[in-house]
């Protein structure tokens, strides 16, 4: 039964389905934008950490013994990043940055999507 000025049940279901599809597409785009922003932030943090490691190396002639030591020294690095309960820096995806004091290299364990 249909009212003279109203929508039928099929019309309402159709409208709800269209709204659902639009929401699904918009949320998918938002996730992609958020991922790319975190990826960019991680690359910037890695550049800053590498710069701090190099500055330390120039001043003291060796690489810092621990990345936590470098983060606590404001004369080398002022990086505002998250840390875990052991005070190791975390990348924007919540994983630790991995530092090798033997060669001064730092990287993240986060696997990023490669562009084709």
Image (cartoon, rainbow, N blue to C red):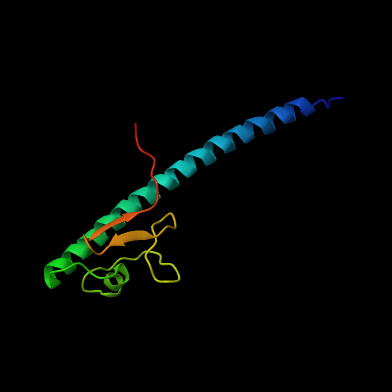
The front one of 74 and 33 is: 74
The front one of 79 and 6 is: 79
Q: Is residue 7 above or below residue 66?
A: above
| Location of the N terminus (image quadrant) | top right
In the rendered structure, the answer to whether residue 21 lies left or right of residue 111 reads right
| Residue in view at x 21 percent, y 70 percent | 76
Q: Is residue 14 above or below residue 44?
A: above
Q: Position of residue 105 (x, y in %)?
A: 24, 57
Q: Position of residue 5 (x, y in %)?
A: 78, 28
Q: Position of residue 66 (x, y in %)?
A: 29, 69
| Residue in view at x 28 percent, y 58 percent | 106
Q: Using the rendered image of the protein, determine whether residue 8 is visible from the camera's viewpoint.
A: no
Quadrant of residue 45 within the rendered picture = bottom left
Q: Using the rendered image of the protein, determine whether residue 73 is visible from the camera's viewpoint.
A: yes
| Location of the C terminus (image quadrant) | top left
List the single residue furthest toward the front. 102
In the rendered structure, the answer to whether residue 75 lies left or right of residue 37 reads left
Q: Position of residue 13 (x, y in %)?
A: 73, 30
The front one of 86 and 45 is: 86
The front one of 49 and 40 is: 49
Total marks shown come to 0
List the single residue furthest toward the right. 1
Quadrant of residue 16 within the rendered picture = top right
Quadrant of residue 67 within the rendered picture = bottom left
| Residue in view at x 23 percent, y 63 percent | 102
Q: Is residue 8 above or below residue 65?
A: above
């Amino acid at each position: 039964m249909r009212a003279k000025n109203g929508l039928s049940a099929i019309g309402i279901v159709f409208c709800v389905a269209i709204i659902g599809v639009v929401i699904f597409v918009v949320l998918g785009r938002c996730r992609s934008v958020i991922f790319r922003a975190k990826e960019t932030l991680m690359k910037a943090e890695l550049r800053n950490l590498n710069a701090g490691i190099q500055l330390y190396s120039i001043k003291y002639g060796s690489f810092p013994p621990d990345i936590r030591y470098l983060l606590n020294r404001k004369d080398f690095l002022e990086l505002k990043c998250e840390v875990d309960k052991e005070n190791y820096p975390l990348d924007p995806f919540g994983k630790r940055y991995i530092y090798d004091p033997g060669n001064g290299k730092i990287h993240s364990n986060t696997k990023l999507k490669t562009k084709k």
